[in-house]
Image (cartoon, rainbow, N blue to C red):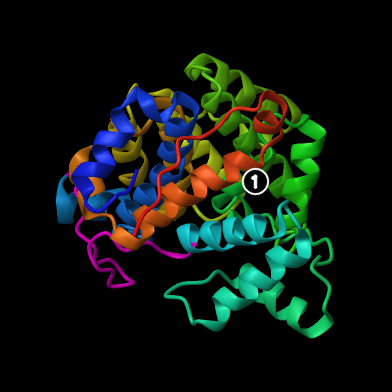
């Protein structure tokens, strides 16, 4: 089946012939990109500044401090796609392949790049080692925002195997136990949603993280203007995800909290996309997402699933959806 227009994309995504798991994986990838593009407009604004400018920010309009085009994504989606390409090329999650892919991405002078990411890639170029040294100050959200390809490629693996695969990519730039724990939680939530888990099942996973580290407790007051610290990020994501009952409501609630809104939007989007599926994504957002990004997300979602132990064990097949 070939995709030549958005209408064809949407017909496939709501058609049972695509396979429920495949469609949820595509929903997760598109959710990541849409959350990134939607949140990028209001990144670094406070909730009151967002209200003054938009009342409620709910449309994909571009702009923001990066002067984004409507539907343009930032480093969150770019790094996920770079990681996905490295996994598809290597046939597995590989630290050296991930580091090389991230280095190539930075060489193309991306529109945005975090300081910890830049420092980690520079260290890889200097030393040749794909693992940054442990650092207590590297508990940012940069490894988590790009982790979706790991969730797809390791579906069906043990938690320990998922954790090891994630550390391989994460430690290129973020070698920190708090970042590792938060990112593993997100990976488990995405995989649980892909396999049919509901919001209660996802909340149980989040609560396990809170039991291990009370900093992640999201039952406190409403999280607003979150920083790039993984704890601030995930408290915001959890609150938005569990206080709403649709993809759109979760994303709107999340990005209107401001702060690092492209990343909180991207992480909320990947989990909510797996939970609600692509049929839950508003067509007005899908319509404006950059076409090359939309196609790359669909292709990588399928390709990464085919690498997963779940598909190897069951002999399952994804619906082949090629794009021009």
Q: Residue at x 19, y 48 (%)?
A: 59
Query: Is any atom of residue 122 visible in this view?
Result: yes
Instruction: Determine whether 159 is above or below 114 in the image.
Output: above
Instruction: Determine whether 240 is above or below 286 in the image.
Output: above
Instruction: Determine whether 240 is above or below 8 in the image.
Output: above
Q: How many marks?
A: 1
Q: Which residues are magenta?
A: 56-75
Q: Which quarter shows the N terminus? A: top left
Q: Where is residue 33 drawn, in percent x and y?
A: 39, 51
Q: Which quarter shows the C terminus? A: bottom left
| Image position of 149 (left or right of 22) | right
Q: Where is residue 14 drawn, in percent x and y?
A: 29, 29
Name the residue that disc number 1 marks. 150
Q: Residue at x 55, y 74 (%)?
A: 105
| Image position of 223 (left or right of 67) | right
Front position in the image: 303 or 84: 303
Task: Tell whether position 69 is magenta.
Answer: yes
Task: Tell whether position 271 is magenta.
Answer: no
Instruction: Determine whether 272 is above or below 118 in the image.
Output: above
SS label for mark 1: helix
Predominant secondary structure in magenta?
Answer: loop
Front position in the image: 248 or 158: 158
């Amino acid at each position: 089946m070939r995709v030549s227009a958005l209408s064809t994309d949407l017909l496939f995504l709501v058609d049972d012939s695509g396979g429920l798991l495949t469609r949820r994986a595509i929903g997760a990838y598109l959710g990541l990109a849409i959350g990134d593009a939607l949140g990028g407009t209001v990144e670094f604004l406070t909730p009151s500044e967002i209200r003054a400018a938009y009342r409620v920010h709910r449309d994909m309009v571009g702009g923001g401090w990066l002067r984004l085009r409507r539907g343009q994504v930032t480093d969150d989606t770019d790094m996920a796609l770079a990681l996905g390409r490295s996994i598809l090329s290597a046939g597995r999650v590989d630290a050296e392949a991930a580091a090389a892919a991230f280095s190539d991405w930075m060489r193309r002078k991306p529109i945005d790049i975090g300081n910890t990411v830049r420092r980690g890639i520079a260290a890889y170029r200097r030393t040749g080692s794909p693992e940054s040294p442990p650092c207590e100050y590297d508990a940012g959200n940069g490894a988590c925002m790009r982790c979706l390809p790991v969730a797809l490629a390791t579906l069906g693996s043990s938690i320990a195997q998922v954790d090891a695969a994630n550390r391989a990519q994460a430690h290129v730039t973020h070698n920190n136990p708090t970042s590792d724990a938060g990112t593993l939680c997100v990976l488990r939530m995405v995989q649980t949603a892909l396999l049919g888990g509901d919001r209660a099942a996802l909340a149980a996973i989040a609560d396990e993280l809170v039991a291990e580290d009370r900093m992640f407790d999201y039952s406190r007051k409403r999280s607003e203007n979150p920083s790039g610290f993984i704890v601030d990020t995930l408290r915001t994501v959890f609150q938005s995800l569990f206080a709403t009952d649709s993809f759109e409501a979760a994303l709107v609630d999340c990005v209107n909290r401001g702060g690092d809104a492209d990343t909180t939007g991207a992480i909320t989007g990947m989990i909510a996309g797996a939970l609600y599926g692509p049929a839950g994504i508003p067509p007005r957002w899908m319509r404006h997402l950059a076409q090359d990004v939309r196609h790359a997300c669909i292709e990588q979602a399928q390709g990464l699933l085919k690498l997963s132990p779940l598909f190897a064990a069951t002999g399952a097949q994804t619906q082949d959806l090629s794009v021009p």
